[in-house]
Image: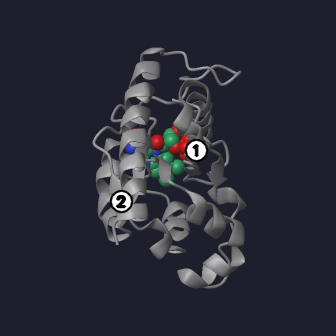
Amino acid sequence: MEENNKLFIPIILGTAREGRESEKVAKYIERKARENFKLKTEIIDVKELDFTGTEGKGLAEKNPKFKTTIEKADGLIIVTPEYNHGYPGSLKITLDMLFEEYKHKCVGMVGVSRGGFGGARVIENILPVIKDLSLVTIRPDLNFSNVEGLFDEAGKIKDESYNGKVDVFLKELIWMTKTLKWGRENIS
Ligand SMILES: Cc1cc2nc3c(=O)[nH]c(=O)nc-3n(C[C@H](O)[C@H](O)[C@H](O)COP(=O)(O)O)c2cc1C
C-alpha cells in the first residue's frame, strides 16, 4: 500500500455537458483512490481545455498542462458518459491531442449512463481508440447505471454495492499500472 503513493493516476472527466452526472462519478472515484489506495490522482476536466483551432497534436501546444500531466501519469482512468451509444466529442478531441505520451500505460474505463447499461456500449465503442493510442486496458470496467439520483447532495453514493466494485477495479488497475511501469523502465 505504501508504494501506491508513488503512483500518479489522473482521471479524465470526459464531458463538458452542463449538469453532467459524470462529474459526481469522477469525484467519487478520486476520493476512493486516495482514501482506500493512497494513490496520487487529480481530475483532468475536458471543460477546462482549449479546443479552438486545429485538432490533433497542434492542440497539445495550447494545453501544456494536459500534456505534462499525461507525461507524468503512470496510468489513467477515463470516465465517459454514453451519448447515443458513443463517447462525447470533447473526450475524443482531448485524447487525440497526444500520442507517444500514452504508450504502454494502463487505463481503467468507467462508463456512466442514465439507462440501465452503465455505459457498457460506450466502453465497447471507445476500445478501438484506446488500442490505437497504445494504452492498455484492464478487464474490469466500472459501469454506473441509472446515474441520476445515485449520489446524495454531499456526493455520497447511495448504492453501497459500488464500493466493492471500485476496490476490485482499482486493485487491478494498480497491478497493471505497476507492471507496465516496470516494463517501460526496464525493457527497451
Ligand atoms: C446527446 C446525449 C445522448 C445520450 N444517449 C444516451 C444513450 O445512448 N444511452 C443512455 O443510457 N443514456 C444516454 N444519455 C443520457 C446520459 O447517459 C446521461 O446524461 C447521464 O447522466 C450521463 O451523462 P452526463 O455526465 O452528461 O450527465 C444521453 C445524453 C445525451 C446528452
Name the residue beneath numbered marker 2.
Answer: 183
Q: Decide: is 8 above or below 59.
A: above
Name the residue beneath numbered marker 1.
Answer: 6
Residue at x 50%, y 30% (from the top left corner) = 147
Nearer to the camera, 114 or 47: 47
Nearer to the camera, 145 or 132: 132
Residue 21: image location, x then y, percent: 58, 38
Nearer to the camera, 81 or 76: 76
Residue at x 42%, y 48% (from the top left corner) = 177
Mark 1 or mark 2: whose residue is earlier in sequence: 1
Quarter residue 29 falls in: top right
Residue 187: image location, x then y, percent: 34, 66
Residue 17 placement, left or right of 170: right
Residue 87: image location, x then y, percent: 43, 57
Mark-to-mark CA distance, 1 and 2? 16 Å
Quarter residue 140 falls in: top left
Q: Mark 2 Cα within 10 Å, few/some/many (few <14, many 20+)? A: few
